[in-house]
Amino acid sequence: MSALLEAVDLSCGYGGETVFANVHFPVRAGEICALIGPNGSGKTTLLHALDRLVRPMHGMVLFEGRSIWDRPPREVARAIALAPQRATQSAWPLTVLDAVMLGRAPQRGWMAPFTREDRRAVGEAMERLGLGALAGRTVSTLSGGEVRRVLLARALAQAPKVILLDEPLTYLDLHYQAEVLALTKALAKEGQAVVLTVHDLALAALCADRVVLLAAGRVCANGTPLEVLRHDVLAPVYGDRLDVLPHPRTGQPIVLPRAAG
Amino acid sequence: MNSSAAAPYSFSTRRSLGWTFLLGIVLLLSVLASVVFGAVSIAPGELVRAVLRTADANPTQRLVVWELRLPRAVLAALVGGGLASAGVAFQALFRNALADPYVVGASSGAAFGATLALTFGFTAGLAGLGPLPLAAFVGAIATVLLALLLAEAGASSSVTSLLLAGTALGTMLSAATSFLLLWRNQPWFQAFNWLLGSFSGRDWSYVAVALPYFFSCYAVLRLLARPLDALTAGDEVARSLGLSVRTVRLVVVCAATLAAAVAVAVSGVIGFVGLIAPHLARLFFGASHRTLLPASALIGATLLVWSDLVARTVLAPVEVPVGIVTAALGGPFFLYVLKSRGGRLS
């Protein structure tokens, strides 16, 4: 199957300084791709480059074979949605419902009134993330995990083909980590491509079909969790104070830091 | 379950419409009150006859109502609505609770432009704008753009620097305006009326000048309600949703500055309406611009109608500049907002 979204020889940076260079990987429909790497390795920048937020210094990002920079912004927003790491602090936050409703703007337009279909899509997205009871609350009164779910719901409401999730599992308690993991699997099953950044390598192994390891400004490894989450692959990047164990039930790798000795 | 999430949306829209309608009625009553009270009191029966211009109406009262008080009240309402809309826009743009046309420097820029035109006797007009409004508009937009340029050059997160740049420019321009007035020995009373704002002696011609500008500015901002919501949610979010943030910013800055500039051109510098009205509206209607804009405009209009009524009656027959009244109301409110936000500016 051909790639839905593809980074081709992609180099990005800020103010002349390169964050990563010559990144090349495809994302197929129905696939979950986890970006891992140490702090500051450029995972978020790469995610932003895939969402047309950062202009590449070199190379390009193709959606269905055509560069996202050759497409109008709204067309890209209809196809690719991003749930950012955190919400911008605002002096007067919108209600949860209004915040999720914004996700419909790429489909409906910025000035057209929302339709029944928009309300249905928003209701469904909020339902999937258990936000129904919070609809009237303002975003500023929510906990970190609740805000995270609002950002996810907005991305779902966009009804995209590719969904980019920046650290979707941080701030979430165990219950919602399981919910979001199940949600990403469900989205992939529905045919969406999911790209997510993850800090916790064990969680990456749990959900991803493919793991891309980003370090020192380049892709160090790209393959299945079993291929990438190995001591000999991770040790050069994270140092060798780590253990890789097989999951007792699934056999997928679990990566843990080694505390002492 | 879908309907449970959709229901509060339609409910809140309907409720907001009701409240907006109520605010409109309050504004109408305020305009009527402003027509009744003054140096010459008019009894309700007389007022009805004067307003309807019936044959048995007292000609003096008819004159007072139709040529003095009504145009003044209508202009005050327009200016109040315009300043409040500009305040909403600037606050959304900078994601800052304390931004208003005055803080960003648009008003002082407009005052400086207009004073320059007065002092040197400019006579050029453009597109229906007389020399004064034209000079006020040019002064306002030049100041805001200069503040934007200075802030962009200063820092990548430009919110605080823009407010600082706007405030610094505003102070400099106010000093320059005072200098011009002193230098050409303009009468102090006239200067005060200009710098603190006044609706004294404003007739229907001012309404005719201001009306189209205020309405088009308001219409543009109202059309951009959803992009304004997206801007308050953050640039990253707005761009990710496919909004061209730069274009929206530019259009919003132009519309809000035009509204502020026209306000200064017809009534002088009136502060704090652009700050108070949006905050009052937010308390009752929330932050969504779909309802925030009309509510703020109506509250701003009502506030300024009452401020003008106080301004011309409290020391009658002497008129207090209306800016003093709004500052006396707005100053404490400004301090309250600052305190309740723990002194944080952004």
Image (cartoon, helix red, strand yellow):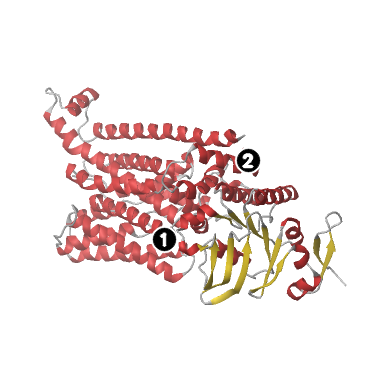
Considering the numbered disc 2 on the image, is that residue within a helix, a strand or a loop? helix
Instruction: Inspect this view and state whether residue A90 appears.
Output: no
Which quadrant of the rendered structure holds the N terminus of chain B? top right
Q: Nearer the viewer, mark 1 or mark 2?
A: 2
Residue identifier under label 1: B246
Instruction: Identify the residue at image location x=22%, y=22%.
Output: B45
User: Which corner quadrant of the image does residue A227 belong to?
Assistant: bottom right
User: Which corner quadrant of the image does residue A255 belong to?
Assistant: bottom right
Q: Are marks 1 and 2 on the same chain?
A: no
**Label for residue A202?**
none
- Residue B114: image location, x then y, percent: 22, 59
Q: Residues within 10 Å of mark 2 (few under 14, many from 20)?
A: some
User: Which corner quadrant of the image does residue B143 belong to?
Assistant: bottom left
Instruction: Identify the residue at image location x=25%, y=46%.
Output: B212
Instruction: Indicate left or right for A72 with A218 as reference.
Output: left
Instruction: Identify the residue at image location x=48%, y=45%.
Output: B287
Nearest the eye: A134 or A24: A24
Nearest the eye: A25 or B119: A25
Q: Chain of mark 2?
A: A
Instruction: Inspect this view and state whether residue A51 appears.
Output: yes
- Residue A117: image location, x then y, percent: 51, 39
Residue type, mark 2 in image = Glu
Residue type, mark 1 in image = Arg
Instruction: Indicate left or right for B170 with A81 as reference.
Output: left
Q: Chain of mark 1?
A: B
Q: Residues within 10 Å of mark 1 (few under 14, many from 20)?
A: few
Considering the numbered disc 1 on the image, is that residue within a helix, a strand or a loop? helix
Residue identifier under label 2: A127
Of all residues, the one furthest to the front in this rendering is A1
Nearest the eye: B287 or B106: B287
